[in-house]
Image (cartoon, coloured by chain):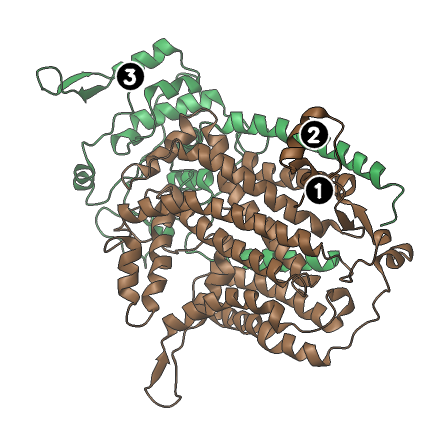
């Protein structure tokens, strides 16, 4: 960010600012001439798409907060007032509600791209880890945001998820009471969730800045997973990728707008339009779709873990489920250190490619399992899915490190592109 | 890769629907004027539906999120709304002597609830609370069809099904048991516009009214949506052309 090698601008106003704070020099360096691999496919749009959705969520969220009342007696009706009496309140609220869904769509595709093309590998480990931090923050933010309308699913979802902490030995119940600010999910819980739901997006924004900063130090990965070797391998970010991102963002927004305007409640649960009632438990308490795979892992551990054929139990089923669920995210943090294979892109890793695509199938399988009542075949399928999830990280990837054959890598991006690979 | 994505989607959707189980029958899939991207409400049906709500449903079900002023959406004039509101008496106050007093309702008042509080509502209905109708079609899965289904789905209980006093058999209700007596029967409401006075017609009209109550913004939303989607299609098309042009002489 030094300004020593700054080139003067022709426009006197821009030059006046830039010679005092070289912000235009920085923008030009990072988004103008920034050398970017020339062979991106459309999967590389989703970082920019997620960024746009984040800004959209912040803007609509702040506007909603101006009209929302964080009180157990008024929250539900204040949301309905936004929907009915606030000018364009329905639009802002539906944009925010569906924005959460599409934020996860964009981020899950972004994560898939990072895994499939090995973007987490050296030298981008920290970039990846910051990304997983963003995912965790998003999950916390989305969960607390879902509680705010104070419908039935809000209330009972909050009850189920906060109760997970009661599985912690010895101090679990005290922690849950502390989280609730009382002896059940109630007004104090709603108040703190609102405060945190307002705060966390700005924390996300800050971590996104670090994420992008780290990206601009190492430069982008690309579908071939090989390093750029010189200017013939890259294009300036502007206009090539500013234009491609603009198109990608607009295409994504078309799908998003179709949901906002024509089926705004298709991704949600009807039960959340019933005001929260602590005395009536819904038949099925189900989280939003983006949590379902993790919810399935949570419920897959239906057995105590201890010494077989004795009554000695080390980990009760409930705690086991909680550990398995948080562990599934922890494994994402560990991924760069588990995968030591020298090749990044799955295009040149035949075994990893199949395992990774199965991982996608598995993710959807777990999603379906999470939506179903935890009984019969769904428990077994959840267990198979959980087993594969863990085996992918802890068995397959370490095995591939040593044994996986490597397809011949192209010598450079430039040559691969010219050959039409 | 593309083929693979397609397979995943098909398997995912297939599993989701194949195993969707339930004890109630799937409600009849009706052809509503408000469904689809160009859907709008039928003003005649809304007004008839309001009549059904007013003369039948409102005996037990409140609509706390609606005000009389909202009825102008149904095609009533402001004077007609004032007259409708004035049919009800609400409690206001305290006045400057500290007393609560009764007065005719104004358009700015919420729909008058049939009960003073939830306990009174439960007491009058064998302990079952008649749910508020303001959001009912959004608060149930497949809300419009479900609401219609419940209204037309009363049947004689099969022999093996035992019903307690105050319970009725309804083929679209979860568990098939409902605490609401069949509210509609042919001819109980007199329509002025010559529309059929049948249970099916009443149910259709009042369902449309309830969908409007839950989603008063539906028409504005869909009309704006058409413009937004058209704009985005054109804009993204132009942006795609620009992108093509810029990338034209670059091998990638």
Marks 2 and 1, Cα distance to the nearest angstrom?
Answer: 18 Å
- Report which colour depicts chain B: green
Farthest front residue in view: A4
Q: Label 1's element?
A: helix
Read off the chain for label 1. A
Q: Where is residue B19? Give x, y as percent.
A: 52, 60
Instruction: Specify few, some or many for label 1: CA neighbours under 10 Å numbering under 14, 14-19, or 20 or more.
Output: some
Residue ID at (32%, 86%): A311
Residues marked 2 and 3 touching at CB (< 8 Å): no
The reply, left or right, for residue A409 in relation to residue A337 is right
**Which residue is outermost to the right?**
A419
> Which label sits in the foreground, 1 or 3?
1
Circle 3 chain? B
Chain A on-screen colour: brown
Write down the quadrant of residue B243 in the picture.
Answer: top right
Considering the image in quadrants, where does the C terminus of chain A appear?
bottom right
Q: Nearer the viewer, residue A228 or B49?
A: A228
**Which percent across, then down, holds residue B78?**
37, 11
Q: Secondary structure at mark 2?
A: helix
For the residues labelled 1 and 3, the Cα–Cα distance comes to 61 Å
Q: Residue at x 47, y 31 (%)?
A: A90
On the same chain: label 2 and label 1? yes
Mark 2 and mark 3: Cα distance apart in space: 66 Å
Q: For mark 2, what is the residue?
A: A15
| Residue B190 drawn above or below residue A404 | above
Residue B85: which disc?
3
Q: Earlier in the sequence, mark 2 or mark 1?
A: 2
Residue A367 or B192: which is nearer the viewer? A367
**What label does residue A31 carry, if any?**
1
Q: Please indicate whether residue A390 sits to the left or right of residue A241 in the image.
A: left
Viewer-proximal residue among A317 and B209: A317
């Amino acid at each position: 960010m030094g300004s020593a090698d700054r080139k003067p601008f022709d426009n006197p106003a821009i030059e006046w600012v830039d010679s005092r704070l070289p912000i235009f020099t920085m923008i030009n360096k990072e988004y103008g001439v920034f050398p970017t691999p020339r062979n991106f496919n459309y999967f590389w749009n989703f970082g920019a798409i997620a960024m746009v959705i984040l800004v959209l969520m912040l803007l609509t969220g702040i506007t909603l907060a101006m009209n929302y009342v964080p009180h157990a007696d008024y929250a539900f009706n204040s949301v309905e007032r936004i929907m009915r009496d606030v000018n364009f309140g329905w639009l802002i609220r539906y944009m925010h509600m569906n924005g959460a869904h599409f934020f996860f769509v964009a981020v899950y595709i972004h994560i898939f791209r990072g895994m499939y093309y090995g973007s987490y590998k050296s030298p981008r480990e920290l970039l990846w880890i910051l990304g997983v931090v963003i995912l965790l923050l998003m999950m916390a933010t989305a969960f607390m945001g879902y509680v705010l309308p104070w419908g039935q699913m809000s209330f009972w979802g909050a009850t189920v998820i906060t109760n997970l902490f009661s599985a912690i030995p010895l101090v679990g119940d005290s922690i849950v009471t502390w989280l609730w600010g009382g002896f059940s999910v109630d007004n104090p819980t709603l108040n703190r969730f609102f405060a945190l739901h307002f705060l966390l997006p700005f924390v996300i924004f800050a971590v996104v800045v670090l994420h992008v900063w780290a990206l601009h130090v190492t430069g982008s990965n690309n579908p071939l997973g090989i390093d750029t070797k010189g200017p013939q391998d890259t294009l300036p970010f502007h206009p090539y990728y500013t234009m491609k991102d603009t198109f990608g963002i607009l295409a994504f927004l078309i799908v998003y707008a179709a949901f906002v305007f024509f089926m705004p409640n298709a991704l949600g649960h009807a039960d959340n339009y019933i005001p929260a009632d602590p005395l009536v438990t819904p038949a099925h308490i189900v989280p939003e779709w983006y949590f379902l795979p993790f919810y399935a892992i949570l419920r897959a551990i239906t057995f105590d873990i201890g010494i077989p054929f004795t009554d000695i139990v080390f980990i009760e089923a409930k705690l086991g489920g909680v550990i398995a669920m948080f562990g599934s995210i922890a494994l994402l943090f560990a991924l760069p250190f588990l995968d030591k294979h020298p090749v990044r892109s799955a295009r040149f890793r035949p075994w990893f490619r199949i395992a990774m695509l199965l991982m996608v199938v598995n993710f959807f399988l777990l999603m379906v399992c999470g939506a179903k009542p935890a009984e019969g075949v769904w428990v077994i399928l959840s267990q198979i899915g959980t087993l594969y999830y863990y085996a992918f990280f802890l068995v397959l990837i370490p095995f591939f490190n040593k044994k996986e054959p490597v397809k011949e890598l192209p010598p450079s991006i430039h040559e691969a592109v010219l050959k039409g690979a | 890769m593309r083929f693979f994505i397609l397979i995943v989607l098909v398997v995912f959707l297939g599993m989701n629907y194949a195993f969707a189980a339930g004890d109630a029958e799937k409600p009849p899939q009706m052809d509503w004027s408000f469904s689809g991207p160009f859907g709008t409400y039928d003003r005649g049906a809304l007004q008839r539906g309001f009549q059904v709500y007013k003369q039948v449903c409102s005996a037990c079900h409140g609509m706390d999120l609606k005000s009389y002023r909202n009825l102008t959406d149904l095609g009533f004039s402001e004077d007609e709304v004032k007259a409708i509101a004035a049919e009800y008496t609400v409690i206001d106050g305290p006045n400057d002597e500290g007393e609560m007093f009764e007065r005719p309702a104004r358009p700015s008042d919420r729909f008058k609830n049939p009960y003073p509080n939830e306990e009174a509502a439960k007491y009058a209905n064998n302990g079952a609370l008649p749910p508020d109708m303001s959001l009912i079609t959004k608060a149930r899965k497949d809300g419009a069809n479900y609401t219609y289904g419940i209204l037309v789905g009363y049947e004689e209980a099969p022999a093996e099904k035992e019903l307690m006093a105050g319970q009725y058999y309804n083929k679209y209700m979860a568990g098939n048991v409902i605490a609401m007596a069949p509210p509609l029967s042919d001819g109980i409401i007199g329509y002025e516009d010559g529309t059929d006075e049948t249970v099916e017609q009443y149910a259709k009209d009042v369902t449309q009214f309830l969908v409007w109550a839950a989603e008063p913004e539906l028409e504005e939303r869909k009309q704006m949506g058409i413009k937004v989607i058209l704009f985005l299609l054109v804009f993204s098309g132009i942006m795609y052309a620009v992108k093509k042009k810029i990338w034209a002489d670059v091998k990638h």
